[in-house]
Image (cartoon, grey):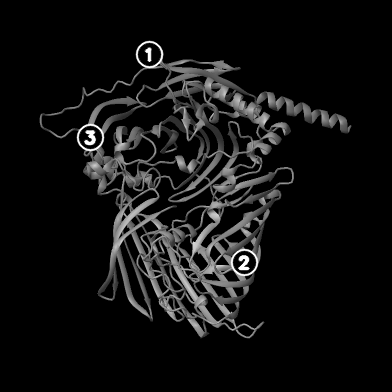
Amino acid sequence: MKNIYYSLLLLLGFVNSVYAQNYTLTGQIKDQNGEPIPFTSVYVKNTTIGTSANIDGIYKLALAKGTYTITFRNVGYKSIDKVLTILGNHTQNVVLAPESYTLNNVTISANAEDPAYAIIRQAIRNRKKHLDEVKEFSCDVYIKGVQKLVGAPKKFFGKDIQRTLDLDTNRRGIIYQSESRSIYNCRRPDHIHEEMIASKVAGRNNAFSFNKASDLEINFYNNIMLENVLSSRGFVSPIADRAMFYYRYKLLGVTMDNGVMINKIEVIPRRKHDPVFRGIIYIADDSWRIQGTDLYLTKNTGINLIDTLNISQQFIKVQDAYMPSNINFTFNGNVMGFKFEGYYLGVYSNYNLNPQFPENYFKGEILKIGETVNDKDSVYWTSTRPIPLTLEEKRNYTRKDSIEKRKESKYYLDSVERANNNITASKLLLTHYTFNNRYAQRSLKLDPILRSLFYNTVEGFGFSYGVTYTKEFENARRYIIRPEVRYGFANKILTGNISSSYIYDPVKRADVGLSFGSGIYDLNPFGTMTMLSNSLNSLLFGKNFPKFYQKQFINGRTSRLLARGLQGTVSLEYANNRNLVNHTLYSFKKDNEFTSNNPFSPLVETPLFPNYQALTAYARLSYSIKQEYITRPDGIFYQESKYPRIDLAYRKGIKNVFGSDADYDLVTLELTKERISTGLWGYFSFLVGTGKFLNNNTVYYPDSKHFRGNNSLTSLPDLRKFSFLDFYQYSTDRHYVEAHLEYNFAGLITNKIPLLRNIKLEEVIGGSYLNQPNKKNYKEFYFGLQRLIFRATYGFAYDGNKKVQQGFRISYGF
């Protein structure tokens, strides 16, 4: 009886599968000249079930048995409806005729305003209504990305480009190809949650694609778009509130589409170098909705890295609204002789405008990538991929996946590991040498020798050398151990320490650490300058800015994510601190300007503090407001929050425990945020901090509150850094207030100057403020230019209303 029951269940399941079986509708879409029309929308009429053609105009749509009206739509062409009866796999080729946009019924008088302006004004008036029309929705998204080189130099830094990037003999080929499928959920204005359910990257079987639906979402109903994406400024929509100031418009014609009159309007920049689009926008009469876009950004607008970006959108009607059916970003560029082009295409289907999200559904996780997303085989992708692969893309998958399989072989991995583990002079001296053991999942990294050498007036010539040992475990857990030794030939002091950390829960950003030993450290724990910079300053220019002390210590710490956006850290350290003095005044410059190792008595070597012991407890809470993050199998990756970060810290010197001399309590509070967009005007960053020693019975100089000063012409960029404040003079053991503000105009002015425009310089202005008992109302102001990692500024420093210093400052680095 049981066997009969199971047999009936299997039979019913088979019958149901046959009844619900999907067949494949395929074909190619061409124009009247026989040329393929890429990225055409193919949808079942009056539904959101559909797909898009690929770059060769070939499409594929899975349908169950039945009769359907299939709509073929592409911007600039007459849409076609085909009634098809699906009884099995079916081929339907389609020819689309160019849409006939006429001006027959439009009256344009001499010297009169173009009719496009009246249409645009209506679109602007209705902009916000359409922006807020759909409060929330969910849909399926398929994203495909292809980037290819179409030209490259033969060699780059001595490496054969064809072999390195696996290109053809003309140095052309696909360098990145991926696709993904996701469920995308959105609640206006800024809540999203995406779950990636499948991902494929050519030649990387264990990788996650870079595809993210929110990155493709571009809404021309917003005034400004793509802020801090392609440039530091945003770009003005053709229907922004102030669009008339940036654009001219020309009505190219009107046509009827399913009973709706569509206006084809050319958008023309009023000024060549404004951050604006150019191209075509399609707007419906009466509703004044955007029906499609074919808009461009060019390098004249200030975009970085690429020369041209085309944004093409097509929409379908969903209930009473219009939602994107596909969005296509096509780009090209030339960077240092590497000519590239490519596209990212998003296909949206199965819209639900009434999704009924659960309470607290949007809790900061903007993208979730499951553990099995890249486990889908070729059968899965063949059956679910909505856009057929081109012949070139098929070959690329086949070639790179086969190469990847060979690379996964034991023989290949062993050979690569042997090659990478070879010791060379350049690795030992200039970069670093790493020995890997992939079977044991461990590595040993040796510091480069030349970067470990230094010179300063306390230690003389010396070296500081370390090695880093890493052991990996499952789920991205790992521990790291780093021993380090330091020796100065002038003071003949050898120090050594070991630091270790164990990341036991990457998802919670949880780790523990232990370090102990001795070392030579800067009196300002924020650091004054790098060892290389100080060595050059001392030897070439006879200036010794950094001051040092010796510390023997043991330190234990732990950190963990306590809640969304809230990171907690605690540590306990016991240290024996010793004062140091200069042991050499050698310099290539005969008339040097060396000072003592005591910043408060530059001409005489007097002890800055007695030798003392300190037991110090430290606790910190760091909270990023509305922190968003991406969850992947290998951990949580936090995104830059749109809101400020709050840091609350407490440091206590514990008296009379293990002979500790320190006796103080310091509380600090900081509020900071970088790159706050101001639209076309650029962005600004700020930091405001305050603190107070609640108890300062015994505070030796190393335990004071220090600030990031600068005494040299060059430095590393840092929002917290003062441009002219002495490195050491104004550390405090009482109370303080500091503030830093910087504004980047992102080329607002230089983009209008022909000689500077092509360099893409960005204008910066800023200021800093410090108030503490020994430095009241100290202020700095500066202005300058920057490009990528380089910056040059000129500034002024004031004590109260008295100007005390001015000059140039140059910074470099990330």
Tell which of 563 and 422 is nearer to you: 422
Percent x, y of residue 490: 54, 67
**Residue shown at the point (65%, 84%) measured from the top left:** 659
Q: Residues within 10 Å of mark 1 (few under 14, many from 20)?
A: few
Percent x, y of residue 612: 58, 81
Q: Is residue 627 above or below residue 54?
A: below
**Residue shown at the point (53%, 67%) measured from the top left:** 459
- Residue, disc 2: 494
Q: Which mark is residue 249?
A: 3
Q: Is residue 760 left or right of residue 548?
A: left
Whether residue 741 can be seen here: yes
Nearer-N-terminus badge (1/2): 1
Seen from this angle, which residue lies furthest right?
A: 1
Amino acid identity at mark 3: Tyr
Tell which of 53 and 520 is nearer to you: 520
Amino acid identity at mark 2: Leu
Q: Is residue 400 above or below residue 185?
A: above
Q: Secondary structure at mark 3?
A: strand
Whether residue 561 can be seen here: no
Q: Residues within 10 Å of mark 2 (few under 14, many from 20)?
A: some
Q: Is residue 579 left or right of residue 38?
A: right
Which numbered disc, 2 or 3, marks the residue closer to the eye? 2
Q: Which mark is residue 594?
A: none
Tell which of 716 and 568 is nearer to you: 716
Give the CA distance from mark 1 to mark 2: 82 Å
Give the CA distance from mark 3 to mark 1: 29 Å
- Quarter of the image holding residue 495? bottom right
Nearer-N-terminus badge (3/1): 1
Percent x, y of residue 17: 69, 26
**Residue shown at the point (59%, 26%) measured from the top left:** 397
Q: Secondary structure at mark 1?
A: loop
Q: Which mark is residue 32?
A: 1
